[in-house]
Image (cartoon, coloured by chain):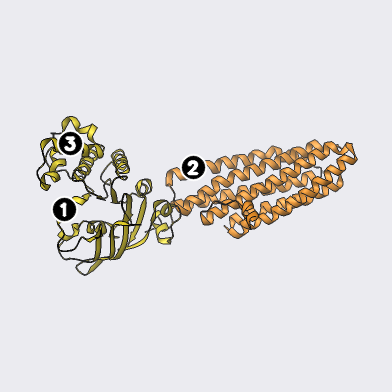
Amino acid sequence: MRRLFDDELDELDNGFTEMGVLVSHTVQKAVAAFINHDREAAQQIIAEDHQINDREIDLESKSFEMIALYQPVTTDLREVVTILKAVSDLERAGDHARNIAHATIEVKGQHRSPEVESQLATMGEQTTEIVKQAIQAYVNKDEQAARDLVAINNQLAAINERLLREVYNQAQADSNVILAAMKYSAVAADLLRIADYMINVGEWIVYLKTGQIVELKLMQNND
Amino acid sequence: MTALISTQGLHVYYGNNEALKGITLDFPAKGITALIGPSGSSKSTYLRTLNRMNDLIPNVTITGKVTFKGQDIYAPQTDMVNLRKQIGMVFQQPNPFPFSIYDNVAFGVKIAGKTSKEEMDQIVETSLQEAAVWDEVKDHLHESALSLSGGQQQRVCIARVLAVSPEIILLDEPTSALDPISSSQIEATLLKLRTNYTIITVTHNLQQASRIADRTVFFMNGEVVEADDTKRIFMNPAKKATEDYISGRFG
């Protein structure tokens, strides 16, 4: 039997996916703007950040409404709760993309390091990839794909370590690079946080499928 | 889990129609168990076998066992008055007798034997207090119970059951004829009673089951589909049929 609830849930689900795609594009654009020193693109990202926030509020209101009006249980409840929780993770990821856009504007004109920027470009690609895969895992309701996000996150952490070492070396060798170096490490931290939020989204996908609340990163350390 | 009451392979037939298809269930002492399921799933039939209320229906055949404190309640030597004292029942429609509130509550005690006035006053007061209706009726105990509201009548009926010191209270949709406020008063009453009594209630109100029951049993077509902790039934049931029913996907 098709219920009215199912139609509303589809609408909520589509809204979440659209927001995910929007965040994914924003992260991609923020990374590209930083690498290409594109201040205009960065300005645009900052100007459009409210779109992500507005969608978060819409999806949250809709989720509260569905809980109040339909009193869902079991998988119905888990679907609504997954969106309600994961939507905050998407919004926070969007905030970090905006931080990167700010850094793009602030780093302009400073002494820069092409080696570090090339490593940041690699980190940016990996981060864009983890966002895409998290959204895809949600669309497919794919628990295994959600669990696999941790592997990309590990690669990112490894690149980040190398990058930070490079940043310190360069800053030590040439004090003119220090201001840029601070921005580089801040952008790397933003990228890592975005990836962390995607791990959270993955955890909510596991909850949706199993009813278990898990810590994917901790589970991997225990293996 | 030691069961206070349990059924083993319980079948009930109305003529040739098999209403219950071999139910095996254990109910531990104390706490609330909710029996849920679509209309016609025979959950009320099951409830009524637990204190032999089905005996009165013509053409009924019951096989299997109902064991209460180790005794088969369908054994020929069972004292029916004593059985229904120990296992009381509250029905869907509040059904006070057309006497005073006091006499309603005292009724079962009087049948059981002689009791002094002081003792009886005490039993009536305690029972009405346990049923959470004392404060509302204490000043007009000798007025007709029929003058009370539906919710108050139902709580007086609960007090009438409590007066004979039962171990098990069976309730057959006790709030379906009541408004939401009266229903929540009954729910609050049952939640207080659950520490001292074993309560088994049939309900069509799934939220009521999820709010008050410790355990929930899902019946369908005369069979038990799933019996588990209420949290598990409503958060993550083992059977798809259970999930479909409680999510309203039936029909």
User: Type of residue at label 2?
Assistant: Phe
On the same chain: label 1 and label 2? no
Q: Residue at x 61, y 39 (%)?
A: A53
Quadrant of the rendered structure where residue A180 is? Answer: top right
Give the numbered dot on residue B82: 1
Nearer to us in this view, B53 or B110: B110
The residue at which mark 3 appears reads as B122
Task: State which quarter of the image contains the C terminus of chain A.
Answer: bottom right
**Chain on which label 2 sits:** A
Q: Position of residue A31 (x, y in %)?
A: 75, 46
Considering only order in the chain, which callout, 1 or 3, is on the residue closer to the N terminus?
1
**Looking at the image, which residue sits at the far right?**
A173
Residue A64, numbered label? 2
Between B14 and B49, the residue placed more toward the observer is B49
B32 vs B76, left or right, is right
Chain that bears disc 1: B
Classify 10 Å Cα crowding around label 3: few (below 14), some (14-19), many (20 and above). few
For the residues bearing labels 3 and 1, Cβ distance under 8 angstroms: no
Q: Residue at x 56, y 40 (%)?
A: A57
Asked if both marks, 3 and 2, belong to the same chain, the answer given is: no
Instruction: Judge whether A174 appears above or below B167 on screen.
Output: above
Which one of the lettered chains is coloured yellow?
B
Chain A colour as displayed: orange
Q: Residue furthest bottom?
A: B16
Q: Which mark is residue B204?
A: none
The location of residue A24, given as percent across then percent down, is 67, 49
Q: Is residue A191 left or right of residue B4?
A: right
Kind of residue at disc 3 = Gln
Residue at the left extreme, as displayed = B114
